[in-house]
Image (cartoon, rainbow, N blue to C red):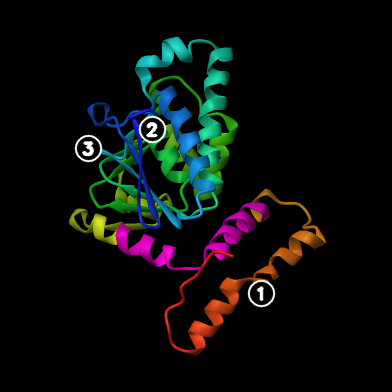
């Protein structure tokens, strides 16, 4: 197991940590491979109800590890092979059925920002910094990664981010819809902990369906009758009965995930 991606579990919360603090968590090929493995492992872990993604040390993630570009991304063919590994990791995180929350402090740029964008929510410290300065490298962002940003911020904002290559603050990131919420640095840990607790206490079948269904609607196309019926299938679940009964009895529900 790569020590540059750490996985920890505490009760029903899992934490994935980008762990190269000496490089501000710059993401290398081994990290992409491990991120994909961890995301798939968490996807089938019935004990996990919510996932936090964070960075060790002074930042969330300061982009890709440029030092390996000449060896692993030195030609268009090599870059496409590297890109396939990268996209596999990003989409494995995006498509994990467990709710994911990025806890962002310090630099969150380039590949680090791409990882954050794949999470369902992004909570940032006020001092966090954002951007995609790839115009300084002469490299382009491939279609799958462009699509993820485009979905989140729209074409005009995405082009502003890419064409200028500017690094900007958390409040501007919030105004661009790159982050969900901005809090004071001292409050970041507590805000994320409270958020993931609220999520984890919710009905896990509902969370998984809402992630899947919103992705399906974004992908487009006519829903099949079977897909349409999925929106009502939860009424046959034990969690539905638990939730309704708890509401009527003015109690907190304890969902079982089935």
- Report the magenta stretch's main SS: helix
Region of the chain picked out in magenta, as a range: 192-216
Q: Alpha carbon of mark 3 to alpha carbon of mark 2: how far?
A: 24 Å
Expressed as whole percent of the image width and height from the top left, the position of residue 157 reads: 47, 45
Query: In the depicted view, which residue is nearer to us: 155 or 124?
Result: 124
Q: Quadrant of the C terminus?
A: bottom right
| Residue holding disc 2 | 165
The residue closer to the viewer here, 74 or 85, is 85
Residue tagged by mark 3? 57
Kindly indicate whether the residue at mark 3 contacts the one at mark 1 (C-beta within 8 angstroms).
no
- Mark 1 vs mark 2: which is more N-terminal? 2
Label 3 or label 2, whichever comes before in sequence order: 3
Name the side, left or right, on which 123 lies relative to 244.
left
- Quarter of the N terminus within the rendering: top left
CA distance for labels 1 and 2: 48 Å
**Which residue is more in the foreground, 177 or 7?**
7
Looking at the image, tell me whether mark 1 or mark 3 is earlier in sequence order.
3
Q: Is residue 203 visible?
A: yes
Crowd class of label 3 (few under 14; some 14 to 19; many from 20; radius 10 Å) = some
Find residue 167 and report its horizontal and vertical position in percent. 32, 37
Instruction: State the residue position of label 1.
Output: 235
Provide the secondary structure element on which disc 2 rests: loop
Q: Position of residue 67 (x, y in %)?
A: 35, 16
Image spot of residue 248 (x, y percent): 51, 89
Circle 2: is it few (<14), some (14-19), or many (20+) Cα within 10 Å? some
- Neighbor class of circle 1 (other Cα within 10 Å; few <14, some 14-19, many 20+) is few
In-image side of 99 versus 127 (left or right):
right
């Amino acid at each position: 197991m790569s020590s540059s991606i750490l996985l920890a579990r505490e009760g029903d919360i899992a934490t994935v940590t980008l762990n190269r603090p000496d490089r501000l968590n710059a993401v290398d090929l081994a990290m992409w491979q491990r991120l994909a493995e961890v995301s798939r492992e968490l996807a089938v872990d019935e004990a996990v109800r919510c996932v936090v993604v964070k960075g060790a040390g002074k930042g969330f993630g300061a982009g890709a590890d440029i030092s390996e570009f000449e060896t692993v991304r030195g030609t268009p063919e090599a870059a496409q092979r590297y890109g396939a590994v990268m996209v596999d990791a990003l989409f494995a995180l995006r498509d994990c059925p467990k709710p994911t929350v990025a806890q962002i402090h310090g630099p969150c740029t380039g590949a680090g920002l791409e990882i954050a964008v794949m999470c369902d929510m992004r909570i940032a410290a006020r001092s966090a910094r954002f951007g995609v300065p790839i115009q300084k490298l002469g490299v382009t962002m491939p279609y799958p990664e462009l699509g993820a940003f485009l979905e989140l911020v729209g074409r005009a904002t995405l082009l502003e981010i890419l064409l200028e290559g500017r690094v900007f603050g958390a409040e501007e990131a919030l105004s661009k819809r790159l982050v969900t919420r901005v809090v004071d640095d001292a409050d970041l840990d507590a805000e994320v902990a409270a958020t993931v607790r609220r999520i984890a206490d919710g009905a896990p079948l509902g969370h998984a369906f809402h992630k899947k269904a919103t992705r399906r609607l974004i992908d487009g196309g006519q829903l099949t009758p079977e897909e349409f019926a999925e929106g009502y299938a939860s009424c046959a679940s034990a969690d539905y009965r638990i939730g309704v009964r708890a509401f009527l009895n003015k109690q907190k529900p304890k969902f079982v995930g089935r």
